[in-house]
Image: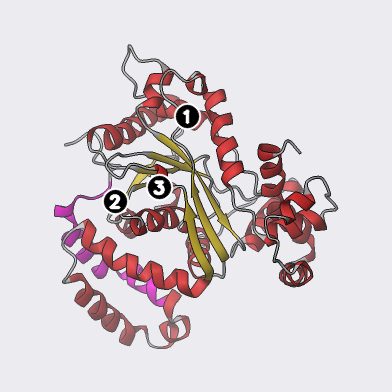
Amino acid sequence: MSEFDDIRPYNDSEVPAVIARLIANPEFIDLLLSRRAPLLAKICPWLLRPLLRLVLSKAAKNMHTVADLQRYLTGSLKGLVDKTTDGFSFSGVEKLDPTKSYLFLSNHRDIAMDPAMVNLALMESGMDTLRIAIGDNLLSKPFAADLMRVNRSFIVKRNISGRREKLTELKKLSGYIRHSIVQEGVSIWIAQREGRAKDGQDRTETALLKMLALSKDRDQSFAQAIGELSMVPVSISYEYDPCDVDKGRELFAKHNGQDYIKQEFEDLDTIQKGLVGYKGRVHVAFGDVLGDESSDILESADKLAAAIDQQVYSHYKLFPSNIIAYQLLGKTAGLEQAKALWPDCDWADTQASFQSRLSAAPRDYRNIITESYAAPVDNYLKATQGC
């Protein structure tokens, strides 16, 4: 048994059995029905279940490898992007070498869409897809683990209490990431922090960077260990966040000293909202490969985190929604510079649209939501102009 078998994505040889297992799983089928046709699923589930299994079985006949599955899903993803956005764009891919593998470390706003958008940008540029880090808190059901791992996701074990066990799992995770990039030549996507930046403040966790170095050789320095991972910061920008009200509700509870307890299927509902909700325009910006082992950027986790943040902030594509939110908070420093990014924007119309969106949210959450949209403007201005 491989040391990574319990966390790695499934191999090609495992795909047919995993897909068959998913189609046979009653919970998975019922979940799909409840999301696609909630009313009919309640009225006549006995009729819809076999029909859905028939549709899935027909599609599965052409899926024998991970690549087959991803080609099928890519078509669905492109259709989804067309329906739920006003345009998808990306930049910086030309700086990447398609023959090399990288560690793409991005800001984190949406559970499913973030890595999907990075993958889509790479695929449309003729590059290979990557492997995706996903927390085991999202895999409470066996079918969820199957669904994610068959689509090139690997597991980050978070629900571990013992210090020794936690260190063992972190070393394994670090080893797998290094093995994938250095030995197998397959790129990795991982978020810059645990959990989404619900307040819009993108910050790289130094603990994550230290984890990446746990798998280094004894004679390697931190800089050498990080340098061979070819780390690339990525900025993902959404004009509108389909989950902004949900994030506002959670932040409001925490700001008022309340314990926020998630509902049983809240993560799944969040994933669905992120997938099918309106996002406006979306942009993915790939930064520069971070130094080499001789660069002082890689001397410590603190310096590296600062360098990643600098790139995430400066490459972040500010949308009019961000700038209007910044203005609504009464902020003026750098406002005209930010507005200059959109010289043809109708700012009165943008403000009316943003305030209409805010008015649909509970009053208690509105300022929190506005601050989350404005936060990237603060960080962008600090990174680019020192404002």
Q: Tell me the CA gap for discs 2 and 3.
A: 14 Å
Res 103 quadrant in image: top left
Residue 252 in sight from this viewpoint: no
Horizontal placement of 175 versus 95: left or right? left
Image vertical order of residue 276 relative to residue 332, above or below: below
Which amino acid type is shown beneath numbered disc 2? Asp
SS at mark 1 in the image: helix
Alpha carbon distance from label 1 to label 3: 26 Å
Decide whether residue 12 is among the magenta residues. Answer: yes
- The image quadrant where one finds the C terminus is top right
- Furthest toward the left, the residue is 13
Closest to the observer: 63 or 332?
332
Q: Which residue is drawn at the image coordinates 49% and 60% (left, top)?
A: 89
As drawn, the label of residue 328 is none
Precedes in sequence: disc 1 or disc 3: 3
Residue type at mark 3: give it: Glu
In the image: residue 147, left or right of residue 134: left
Per the rendered image, the range of residues in magenta is 9-33
The amino acid marked with disc number 1 is: Leu
In the image, residue 167 lies at what x, y percent?
40, 26
Label 2 CA crowd tier, 10 Å (few <14, some 14–19, many 20+)? some
- Taking the magenta stretch, the answer to whether it contains residue 176 is no
* Residue 383 can be seen in this image: yes
Q: Earlier in the sequence, mark 2 or mark 3?
A: 3
